[in-house]
Image: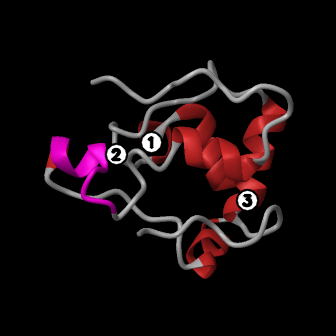
């Protein structure tokens, strides 16, 4: 399965930008979202923020860095440690927790 690992935005992209470019292809309520078309199920959306907060920073960091199977979740969630450095993962997690760039991206 091809994951959306487009070239990262240049410079020091915000967590919001990284999520928009790399994550919403699957974690979106859009009919164009890839994951539901492949598996007939939908991955968790990034809202409400309380859900992200309940998961916690350590869990979100781990699932992004190491993939779903490492935390007992879907094998379809790829690991991103080859794409994002630690600072970028931290910016993504901060964004999902609502600590950077406003609220998490919502489904449209």
Q: Position of residue 73 (x, y in %)?
A: 39, 49
Q: Is residue 36 magenta?
A: yes
Q: Quadrant of the N terminus?
A: top left
- Determine the secondary structure under disc 3: helix
Q: Which residues are magenta?
A: 30-38
Per the image, the residue denoted by label 3 is: 95
Res. 13 image quadrant:
top right
Q: Nearer the viewer, residue 47 or 50?
A: 47
Q: Position of residue 71 (x, y in %)?
A: 50, 46
- Label 3: few (<14), some (14–19) or many (≥20) C-alpha neighbours in 10 Å: many
Q: Position of residue 48 (x, y in %)?
A: 55, 79
* Residue drawn where x is 22% and y is 52% of the image: 36
The mark found on residue 19 in the picture is none
Residues at marks 3 and 1, CA–CA distance in whole angstroms: 19 Å
Marks 2 and 1, the one that precedes in the sequence? 1
Q: Quadrant of the C terminus?
A: bottom left
Question: Can you say whether 5 is above or below 87 in the image?
Answer: above
Per the image, the residue denoted by label 1 is: 68
Q: Is residue 91 magenta?
A: no
The mark found on residue 74 in the picture is 2
């Amino acid at each position: 399965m091809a994951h959306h690992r487009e070239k990262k935005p240049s410079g020091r992209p915000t967590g919001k930008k990284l999520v928009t470019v790399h994550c919403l292809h699957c974690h979106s309520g859009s009919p164009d979202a890839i994951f539901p078309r492949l598996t007939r199920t939908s991955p968790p959306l990034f809202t409400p923020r309380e859900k992200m907060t309940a998961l916690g920073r350590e869990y979100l960091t781990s699932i992004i860095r190491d993939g779903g199977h490492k935390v007992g979740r879907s094998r379809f969630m790829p690991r991103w440690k080859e794409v994002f450095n630690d600072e970028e993962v931290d910016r993504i997690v901060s964004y999902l927790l609502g600590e950077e760039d406003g609220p998490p991206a919502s489904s449209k």
